[in-house]
Image: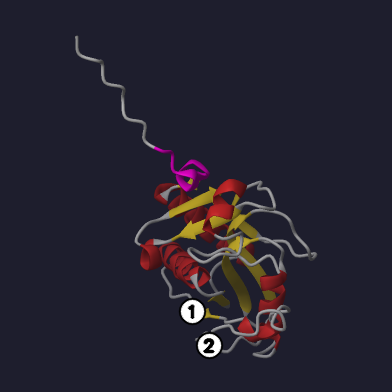
Amino acid sequence: MSESRRPEVVPADPIADATRLVLDGDQIARACARMAHQILEANRGARGLVLLGIPTRGVVLARRLAAAMADVEGEHIPVGALDVTMYRDDLRRQPTRVVGKTQVPVEIDDAVVVLVDDVLYSGRTVRAALDALGDLGRPRAVRLAVLVDRGHRELPIRADHVGKNIPTRAGERVSVRLSEIDGVNEVTIVSEAGVSEVGGPGAGGPSEEDPV
């Protein structure tokens, strides 16, 4: 009598099991459309608006927001990039950082500047962005738009426009992937177990605001 074969057991992938999807491509598109309308409503139109994305994925989001606003208003909204590398408060601990490019398409004096980033976490990246912006001019107002606010603020900074508030634990990592860079649109959360597998909350890969 032949012995019955036991089913093959496939080992679980600890990283895949520890990752959960919180925004897919359609949800990201709807969040951007909603933020675009909110920005226009707060500004009472597109007049005087300048969008500056914080590299890397903040720049992509800024372009998406500008395109959505142009569809509504029928006019071009200037979009640029604001690199904050040299304004970070952790340079002494991590001195070897690649300095990106700051590209400001128009004068920002008396403009309404909307800073755009993918994830708002400690607030320190935004504080660095405000310092960098102060060296470029004196805007009439500065506002902040983020795709994800994950909480855990260390500074008194609040976003004016948020795609989605996502409660997280401090040990988790929020991963934002956008098709222009990553080939896919999604936001996922990697739990503490998965973070330990990939090297900790600050490990490489899709972006998240650094906690320091």
Image disc number at residue 182: none
Kind of residue indicated by mark 2: Val
**Residue name at image x 69 percent, y 80 percent:** 88
Rendered location of residue 206, percent (x, y): 48, 63
Give the alpha-carbon distance from disc 2 to disc 1, as whole Å.
7 Å
Residue 78 point in image, percent of width and height? 49, 79
Region in magenta: 11-20
Q: Quadrant of the N terminus?
A: top left
Instruction: Name the residue beneath numbered marker 1.
Output: 78
Q: Secondary structure at mark 1?
A: loop
Please give left or right for residue 9 compared with residue 125 in the image.
Answer: left
Q: Amino acid at mark 1?
A: Pro
Residue furthest top in the image: 1
Whether residue 60 sits left or right of residue 122 in the image: it is left
Q: Position of residue 157 (x, y in %)?
A: 75, 65
Label pair 2/1, CB-CB below 8 angstroms:
yes
* Residue drawn at x 60%, y 72% as measured from the top left: 114
**Residue nearer the viewer, 194 or 63:** 194
- Figure quadrant of residue 44: bottom right
